[in-house]
Amino acid sequence: MNNINNDIKNKTFKPVYLICGTEDYLKKQMKDNLKNALAGDDDINTLEMNEKADINELVSFGSTLPFFSPNRLIILDRTDIFKKSFTYKDENGRERKISDFVDNMPDYLHIIIVDEAPDKRTSLYKSINKKGYICEINKQTVSTLTKYISGRCKENGKSIDDVCIKSIIARTDSDLGIINGELEKLFAYTAGKYSIDSHDIDAVCSVCVENRIFDMIKALGVKDKKKVYEMYFDLLTLKEPAMKILILMQRAFSGILQAKEGKGKIDRKTLAGSIGMKGVAPFVAANYLSQADNFTTGQLKKIVESFARTEEDIKTGRIDERTGTELMIAMALE
C-alpha cells in the first residue's frame, strides 16, 4: 500500500495496478484513492466495468485519446478478466490477447484492476507484474484490528475491553469494512453511555458470513442435510456469491485438516500460527479444533483436494460457481 500512496503523493503513476487480496475495505479505499488521483470526477475519460469485462469496449476506450485531459482511466472491479481467455482484433485484423494490450498500452492510459484471487498463471497477471504494480491486501492481524477498534472507541468517548473487541473481530471475520459498520451501530446504540459491553454487541452486531459457514460445517459434520441446505440457501438469499461460500468453506476445511493433524501435539496459540492463513486468531483455531472430531483425516484430505479441483474448474470455466459449490456440499455430506 505504501508504494501506491507514494505514487499518489509524487504523482508518478504506473500504467496498471492490480489490487488483490481478502481485505475488501482497504482494497476499495486504495482503488478510490487512485481513481481520485488519476481522474477525479472526470467521467468522460473514465470507464468502469463490474462483474463482466467487455474486451472490445475496453480496447476501443483505451485506444482513444483523452478528451481535454492528460489521462484515460479504466477500472475493472471484480470482473471475469482473469477467468476467461479474452481476445480482440488489432488494427491489422490479427487476434490478440488482453495481455498484449496491457504490454502495449498508450502512455495516457491507466488501468486499475480489483480482484480477490487472480490467477497468477495467466499471461495477463504476468504482464501486469512486468508493466505495473501488484498490491496484495489481506485481512489485518488480530493485534492490528484490536488497536484499531480500541482507537475508534476512544475517539468516540467509549471504553471497551479485550473480550468485547475479540467478539467484534470474530463476528465480522476480521473484515475492516464490516468492523467500521458495526462500530457505527454500537456508537449510536450506546449514546449517552461510556462503556460498550457484551450485551450491546449481542443487541446490535450481526454474525458474519464466516460464522455462518462454521455453522454449516457443524451441520455437515453430523450429516444434518436439512440444516445444511437451509443455511446455504439463506446465504444465497442474502446475496452472498456462491464463489465466496465455496472459498470460505475451502478455507475452513483446510484449517480443520491442519487442526486434526496437529491436535494433541501443540497448543491453540501455536496451532493458530501454523494454519495457513494470515492473522488467524486463537479463537478461530478453537473453532477448527472443535470440528476436527466430526471428520476423519482421510475425509478431510479428500474434501480439501476436491475443493482445489473444483476451484480450478470454476476458474477455467469448466463449471459455474453455484454448481461447483453445491457439488462440494453434496460431497461433504456423503
Image (cartoon, rainbow, N blue to C red):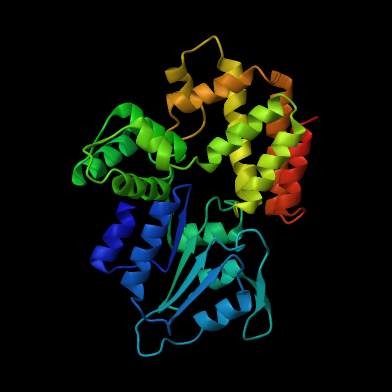
Nearer to us in this view, 222 or 110: 222
Q: In the rendered view, does 295 fall on the left or right side of 212?
A: right
Residue 166, above or below 289: below
Nearer to us in this view, 245 or 61: 245
Nearer to us in this view, 90 or 244: 244
Place of residue 258 in the rendered image (x, y in percent of width and height, measured from the top left): 58, 23
Please, which residue is most extreme toward the bottom here? 68
**Within the image, what quadrant is residue 157 found in?**
top left
Please, which residue is most extreme toward the top here? 264
Place of residue 175 in the rendered image (x, y in percent of width and height, measured from the top left): 43, 44
**Within the image, what quadrant is residue 45 found in?**
bottom left
Place of residue 116 in the rendered image (x, y in percent of width and height, measured from the top left): 52, 52
Q: In the rendered view, does 299 fall on the left or right side of 149?
A: right
Residue beneath the point at 28% across and 41% down: 148
Q: Is residue 241 visible?
A: no
Looking at the rendering, in which quadrant would you find the C terminus? Answer: top right
Residue 156, above or below 304: below
Q: In the rendered view, does 134 fall on the left or right side of 306?
A: left
Q: Is residue 25 visible?
A: yes
Residue 177, above or below 131: above
Label tally: 0
Residue beneath the point at 60% across and 55% down: 239
Please, which residue is most extreme toward the right here? 334
Nearer to us in this view, 241 or 71: 241
Place of residue 131 in the rendered image (x, y in percent of width and height, measured from the top left): 45, 63
